[in-house]
Image: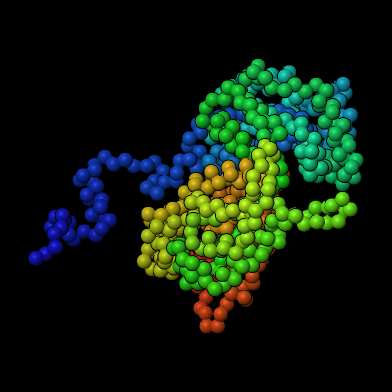
Amino acid sequence: MPPHTNMTPNETSLDASALRERRQSQYNPLPHRLAEGENATPLEVVGASASDKLVIMMVGLPATGKTHIARRICRFISFFHDIPSQIFNVGDYRRKICGAKMPASFYDPKNEEALEQRTMACNAALSDLIDYMKQDGVRIGVFDATNSSRERRNHLCKALEEAGIGAKKMFLESICDDDKLLEENIRKVKVSTPDYKGEDPDKAVADFKERRAQYMSYYETLDSSDGSYIKIVNCRTFVVNAIRGYLPLKIVHFAMNLHTLQRTFYLTRHGQSEYNLLGKIGGDSGLSDAGLEYARRLGKFAEEEISGKLSEDEDGNKVKSSRPCRLWTSTMRRTKETAQFIKHDSFPFKFDNKEEVDWVQFRPHPWRNLDELYAGTCDGLTYKEIEQIYPEEFQCRQQDKLAYRYPRGESYMDVTLRLEPLAHEMERTREPVLIIGHQGILRILYAYFTGLTREEAPYVSIPLNHVIRLSPHAYGCEEKRICLMEKSEMLKDGQDEPVTSMPVKDEPTSTQYESTDPIMNAPSC
């Protein structure tokens, strides 16, 4: 007796795709079709939720972290939400008009000639901001200056209204009255700017403090008469006034996670897994022998290089003491096994909010957000098998690696969306963080902090057995790559090299090994 089937006699001769189209036309003649296509990118990562335009006007004395905050906001909103944004820094305009190295007296409000030149720089930046905001598709413009007086702020608002760009306006004020934090900001950031390039550090600090005092003489903080604003005090206290709308509230939420303190992230892939050895992508395999050896070395590195902090005692001798550190992994077996040799000592610790805790060093925190890009029906296959079984899918991924979504799986754009909350946490965290993750995931995080575009992210080289140390700051991100285990130590007699991942573009960052190296760049989704 023939098997039961719902097919009509005419349908049995049709292939699957033709059958699907025929049935859809019969049973769903008016289907819901996505304008972006069947394999559409999530709206949250293409800026579709933000239709309003917004101008953010920074307020604050020099060395309060205004530029750092402005840059982090624009980076976050453009990378994770594809919302076009640009910063207009009045200091850059002033340097073009007047030159970089101007004495503190140049900022004296009684210096009429200098005031005229600074006003010229302000108006030039404001004019460019207005021209930018008039463009179609533009969403956010940031006016980065001290904007110390209410008179100046009223001038900005009036000019924006007269320009008729129809944008919402909000002020963001950064206040720093913590002497220790202020001194750190001046020495680590301001003395390295073009204004003090090549100057003696102590003289530069003294001149900058005098410049800051000039602004303090007429500084007026924000109040309700300024309209919508968020006020940030020492990166700990927040005052929000009359903020409304999707985009302004998104900015406020993100800004409340920011701080200007120095921080360091350590990114590493898990040790070589059993699937890496076979050239398979995805899966939830354990570590190979080489992977276990890397895990041991990572444990030693974490103890000696990450948790140890050098300081000087009363006699000037260098003393090594523990500093609180965090450990994040995915929920997958290979990352947890890579963390198994990291020690978890405990010691008393006091947060800046006066809370005292018994800190557990490198307490494991598994994040579902950090799980590898899911390959769907291709999970557990090699790239050669994918090319043979799903040739059309293979070619689609070759053509657009960023937006391509595996059948019943994820794309890099999907991963970007689920990494947004983790970016908030990374911006908020003040302690060093060791992240043991997967190549696809670490590519996105690396690209975000180093200033790469989303289109470049899928092609970043994140080799096995390396720790990538990132130290973001106001004007960029310092990077150092540390190899804990050479390729030659991983090979065994008679081992065939795993199948290489499909060809990639030129890497934006040079590495010790070629980007197509099948061992160090083991297959990943």
The residue closer to the viewer here, 277 or 271, is 271
Question: Please, is residue 200 above or below residue 240 in the view?
Answer: below
In the displayed structure image, the side of residue 139 where residue 40 appears, left or right: left
What's the residue at 88%, 36% (across, down)? 207
Q: Is residue 490 visible?
A: yes
Q: As drawn, which residue projects farthest toward the bottom?
A: 494
* Residue 85 coordinates in the image, percent (x, y): 60, 37
Q: Nearer the viewer, residue 402 or 299?
A: 299
Would residue 134 appear left or right of 155 to someone viewing this image?
left
From where the camera sits, is residue 129 visible?
Answer: no
Q: Which quadrant holds residue 202?
A: top right
Which residue occupies the foreground of this view, 191 or 293? Answer: 293
The quarter in which the N terminus is drawn is: bottom left
Horizontal side of 182 relative to 470 (left or right) equals right
Residue 81, percent from left and from top: 53, 41
Q: How many marks?
A: 0
The picture quadrant where one finds residue 178 is top right
Colour pattern = rainbow
In the image, is 98 to the left or to the right of 465?
right
Give the residue drawn at x 59%, y 74%.
490
Residue 192 placed where, x, y %? 81, 44
Which residue reaches farthest top?
225
Looking at the image, is 39 positioned above or below residue 86?
A: below
Location of residue 312 in the rendering, given as x and y in whole percent from the top left corner? 83, 52
Kindly identify the residue that appears in the image at 83 percent across and 56 percent down.
318
Q: Residue at x 88, y 23 (%)?
A: 111
